[in-house]
Amino acid sequence: MDFFAHQDRARRNTGWLVVLFIIAVTLLVFLANFCIAVTIGWTELNAVKPNGTSSFNIILDQFSWKRFIYVGIAIWCVVLGAIIFKRLQLSEGGKRVAESLGGHRIYPNSDNADERRVLNVVEEMALASGMPVPPVYLLAYEVGINAFAAGNSPSDAVIGVTRGCINLLNRDELQGVIAHEFSHILNGDMRLNMRLITALHGIEFIGGMGEVLLRVRSNRSGAQVFLLGGALWIIGFLGTFFGDMIRSAVSRQREFLADASAVQFTRNPQGIADALKVIGGHQAGTSISSPATGEVSHIFFGQALSRLGGMFDTHPPLMDRILRVQPEWNGAFIYKEVQKEAPETEAEDRNKEKLAKAVAMGAALNGEFIDPAELLLQGNIVSVQEGLSHIPDALRGQAHDPLGASALMLGLLFSDDEAVYQKQLGYLKQKPTPGLLELIQQQTPALEQLSRALYLPLLELSMPALKCLSAEQYKLFKQRLLLLIRADEEVDLFEWCLFQELQHYLDPEFGKVRNLRPRYREMQQVAEPYRLVLSVLVYEGHDDSEDIERAFNRGIGSAGLYNLTILPADACELGEFRAAVKELAYAYPHLKPRMLMGFVNAVKQDGVITPVEREIVRSIAAVMDSPVPSLDEPQG
């Protein structure tokens, strides 16, 4: 998948969304004026009908440009007001959508076998796609088989699954569904979906007002209120009609793309094909019963709600989706009863031996040693499953608990210098949290033995648990991070990388974060910050001066900035580096792939990719709010 190409396509779709929205509201203005003219004309007809005057002319006489303008302004104000309100609601990210549908968060330390399975699948898919692990929400009372991804960006994204989804799908089928949802996050569809919810809420809000007025009972003005409510309801119905039409126009084709992307992620077309077949054989299908389904129906894996005889369904027919993935399908669906599978830990144990044998055989055939920790970073789901098995069970268990995850992140920052270490201990003892220091000291031996390549994956596994902290706990956790980092009175690159990823992906959970507005359209506008960031990257990853020069030249060549020269090593200060990375984040989406691929090609130049290089590239990508490019594909 080309994330940035899809981002550009999503931006074009957003443009079409704006055009369709303006047309829809304009039509509503005309219809509102028509309804008002009919209502007033009907009143006139009931009062007295002048001789020789037709009913049509009486109604036509009620049209007034002055009223037309006033009504138009009123409707636009109502629509825009509703949009602003909804936008403020959704600024909290995907969790707001999940909660509106009746979902509750599956805690990372859940011991339920079905919940544990979906959590593990989401973890694997996130690491394979270079994303932080998102929280998972369960729609516990929905028996239909469905799922969704919601959020404004990868940092506040959530994955939602229904009870039917986790009870009826096996691991491979569930993996296909989750991969489909991750593709929506990575190709920009998720952000477009959120904008669609916001825009269409304004149109459909008018219909809601009409329904309220229709329920009003008044002895003195019942007829007038009823007529006004009926008019608004008709307008609102037409608004819903336009909304469904826009959802359908924007959504259908993207589902085929997401299905194809799921196959690309998992390398297993059978998984998502069988999931679709199970849906076809399930009585409840993909239906969602929540009252909030209407305005978010387009975000689901399958058709959550069908209106107007399916004329404007947001998803293609089920059979068409299956045949796209599996052209040889014989038309038979899969019929399942709810059954409990073996606990996820047992399934993992069965997979570990097979995966380990496959990796060992591959290494023997190639005559090479493969560091198991490096498998976790290859962007392949099978490699990720094998790589995760090399993180000690004790550390993985702690990563699923809020206190344990906090202890892991703080433990990674402890210094080898005894004086600094004692100073760091002193900081943690100032405002002690019961059990925290003991946990850190308990984890220290395992952390000291952990491969450096697994530090950031361990961080990403900890994200859902850290998002379960309270706002006050997160504030204290962040303060402790800064104290430990500054204990030696300097900030090294690893400390910057760790803090940057934590801050970028956790801050949206605990407060509203203002989205960056792009301001750089040309590469030349970011040439200097790019030069500084690339210089730091190549100095950190290479020792030989010729390798440094070649890596820098490859990086600027990939970005199309051929006239730049590398900065002297003493000019590459970390403070300026941090500021430069933030400047790159203000580039327009079409520039980001060139910059990121420049960094990737620079670290690939010598054929050796160090954990430090990985950490820097992953952190730069996080600041730029972009998926991490693959570091293990052949150089292009």
Image (cartoon, rainbow, N blue to C red):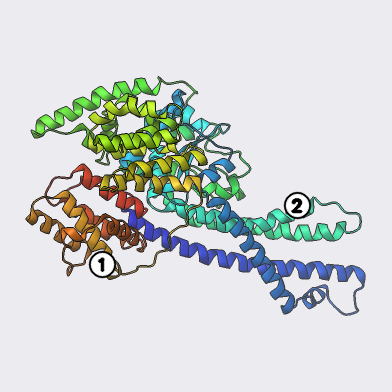
Q: CA distance from mark 2 to mark 1?
A: 57 Å
- Crowding at label 2, few (<14), some or many (≥20) Cα neighbours within 10 Å? few
Three-letter code for the amino acid on which mark 2 is drawn: Val
Asked whether, in this view, residue 353 is left or right of residue 174, the answer is left
Q: Nearer the viewer, residue 108 or 181?
A: 108
Q: Nearer the viewer, residue 292 or 263?
A: 292
User: What residue is drawn where x is 73% and y is 56%?
Assistant: 210
Three-letter code for the amino acid on which mark 1 is drawn: Ala
Q: In which quarter of the view is residue 276 placed?
A: top left
Label of residue 553 in the image: none
Question: Would you name the residue on which mark 2 appears?
Answer: 212
Q: In which quarter of the view is residue 554 placed?
A: bottom left
Q: Residue 340, image x and y in percent?
A: 46, 20
Instruction: Establish if 109 lies above or below 92.
Output: above
User: What residue is drawn where x is 40% and y is 39%?
Assistant: 463
Q: Nearer the viewer, residue 502 or 4?
A: 502
Question: Would you name the residue on which mark 1 appears?
Answer: 527
